[in-house]
Image (tube, rainbow, N blue to C red):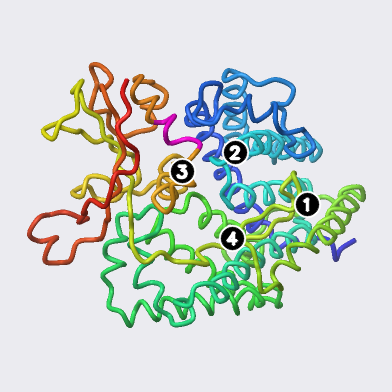
């Protein structure tokens, strides 16, 4: 059974497991703090109604047995506590079956949340975390050497993440092939970071180099992950460097962070630290379990691979309700202009041309032109992200924007806690409306003169004033 063990990968496994536990922690904390106003009993898209409409086989979840906001909170905080324990090394302090059970519980709890989260949990990194989390059940602990088969499955996942993202760009927007997409992307991405203004202001030739490097990294380098060492480690290093660049230039929840974590599966880091004492012989049943896992992943990979090869490739799709083997990709299309939906309220009982409107500020998305973009990733601000989609098309907000305005009119505290500021701290406003603005980064001259990061101009009314 020696071929099935990879003792030199002990540090890579350690970083992979700890990194996954950290990402799980971010996911569970987000659910504990955001799920209730978004999809709780009185949320913008209530989960109880969804559970009545969708059967268990299409959306497996513990909440088909019972849903309440209290139970959701119990699940989320339990997941957060277990994630923190695994981050601190719990899995290496218990027997192998108990360690596997701990990872399985994490996966089942987060799957239960994702499968009732509706539009708020429709992002590709949810499936990515679940797929990686399922594989983590079979990574073993200090009682076993790192299993070669499971690590190869992690590399296969990383390959699909990177190669899928590269293909969707090459086949999608023509600006990727012309190397001009980054003329716009840093400005129009969903949630800019503190450095995005500076990235946007790089010279055009550097933007073209960025785009070309992206194609090399996502279309060529992923194949090298399967090569012998040290080539695979060098390929993993390129992936890590690329992801760090993306982390610096934007907020994409835990997508880039988790991609870095996955890269540890391909890296030989044995030169960094002396290996610990040799692990006991791997139990035969555990080796058999990893082989069964490999067969399952191979079978379920058929449709994701077919999607990769299709000229009509889709982004971020799950082919099974357990999110075991998925397809990934991002930014097949890059928007050329940035629009923002701005929510405003007023105390005036009667609206006149002189009515004074005050803005609600969000935590992450652009609002006040003078406020520097903030860094939130790997934490995911779900409402802020959906507001970006709402600005692209009202269809994205059809089910939840009006309820959001109604919650503001009612002064709903859980909803207000999702926002950065409440301009009506004493009593709710008499009216709430939404307006669409065109945003662009200021020029260097404008930045020096005004201190603003953004320049904005009104476009049109997005949601007419709603009375209390």
Q: Nearer the viewer, mark 4 or mark 2?
A: 2
Which is more N-terminal, label 4 or label 1?
4
Apparent side of residue 383 relative to residue 17 in the rendered image (left or right): left
To which residue does mark 3 refer?
A: 379
Mark 2 vs mark 1, CA separation in Å: 43 Å
User: Are there few (<14), some (14-19), or many (20+) residues within 10 Å of tag 1?
Assistant: some
Q: Give SS at disc 1.
A: loop
Please check the rendered image and state whether residue 296 is part of the magenta-colored stretch, yes or no.
no
Q: Give SS at disc 2.
A: helix
To which residue does mark 1 refer?
A: 279
Mark 2 vs mark 3, CA separation in Å: 19 Å
Going 40% across and 49% down the picture, which residue do you hit?
Answer: 388
Q: Give SS at disc 3.
A: loop
Which is more N-terminal, label 2 or label 4?
2
What residue range appears in magenta? 399-404
Residue 49: give x, y in percent of width and height: 63, 26
Say if mark 1 contacts mark 4, CB within 8 Å: no
Mark 1 vs mark 3, CA separation in Å: 35 Å
Apparent side of residue 385 relative to residue 92 in the rendered image (left or right): left
Going 64% across and 49% down the picture, which residue do you hit?
Answer: 127
Say if mark 1 contacts mark 3, CB within 8 Å: no
Mark 4 vs mark 2, CA separation in Å: 44 Å
């Amino acid at each position: 059974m020696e071929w099935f063990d990879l003792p030199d990968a002990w540090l890579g496994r350690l970083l992979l497991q700890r990194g996954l536990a950290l990402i799980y922690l971010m996911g569970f904390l987000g659910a504990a703090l955001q799920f209730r106003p978004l999809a709780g009993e009185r949320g913008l898209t209530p989960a109880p109604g969804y559970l009545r409409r969708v059967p268990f086989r299409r959306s497996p979840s513990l909440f088909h047995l019972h849903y309440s906001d209290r139970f959701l909170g119990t699940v989320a905080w339990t997941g957060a506590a277990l994630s923190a324990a695994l981050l601190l090394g719990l899995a290496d302090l218990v027997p192998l079956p108990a360690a596997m059970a701990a990872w399985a519980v994490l996966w089942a709890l987060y799957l239960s949340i994702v499968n009732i989260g509706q539009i708020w949990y429709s992002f590709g990194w949810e499936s990515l975390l679940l797929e990686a989390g399922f594989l983590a059940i079979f990574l073993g602990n200090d009682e076993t050497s790192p299993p070669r088969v499971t690590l190869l499955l992690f590399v296969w996942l990383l390959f699909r993440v990177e190669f899928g993202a590269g293909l969707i760009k090459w086949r999608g927007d023509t600006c990727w092939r012309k190397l001009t997409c980054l003329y716009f992307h840093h400005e129009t991405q969903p949630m800019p970071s503190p450095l995005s203004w500076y990235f946007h202001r790089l010279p055009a030739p550097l933007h073209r180099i960025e785009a070309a490097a992206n194609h090399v990294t996502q279309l060529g380098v992923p194949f090298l992950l399967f090569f012998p060492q040290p080539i695979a480690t060098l390929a993993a290093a390129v992936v890590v460097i690329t992801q760090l660049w993306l982390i610096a230039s934007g907020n994409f929840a835990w997508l880039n962070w988790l991609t870095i974590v996955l890269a540890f599966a391909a890296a030989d880091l044995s030169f960094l630290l002396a290996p610990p004492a040799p692990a006991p012989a791997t139990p035969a049943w555990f080796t058999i379990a990893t082989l069964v896992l490999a067969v399952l992943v191979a079978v379920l990979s058929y449709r994701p691979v077919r999607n990769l090869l299709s000229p009509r490739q889709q982004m971020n799709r799950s082919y099974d309700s357990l999110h075991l083997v998925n397809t990934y990709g991002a930014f097949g299309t890059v928007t050329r202009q940035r629009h923002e939906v701005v929510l405003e309220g007023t105390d005036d009982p009667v609206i006149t041309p002189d009515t004074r409107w005050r803005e609600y500020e969000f935590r992450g998305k652009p609002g006040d032109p003078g406020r520097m973009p903030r860094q939130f990733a790997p934490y995911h601000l779900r409402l802020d992200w959906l507001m970006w989609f709402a600005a692209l098309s009202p269809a994205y907000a059809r089910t939840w924007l009006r309820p959001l305005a109604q919650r503001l009119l009612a002064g709903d505290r859980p909803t207000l806690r999702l926002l950065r500021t409440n301009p009506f701290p004493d009593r709710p406003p008499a009216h709430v409306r939404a307006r669409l603005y065109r945003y662009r980064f200021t020029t260097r001259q404008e930045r020096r003169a005004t201190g603003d990061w953004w320049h904005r101009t009104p476009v049109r009314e997005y949601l007419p004033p709603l009375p209390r």
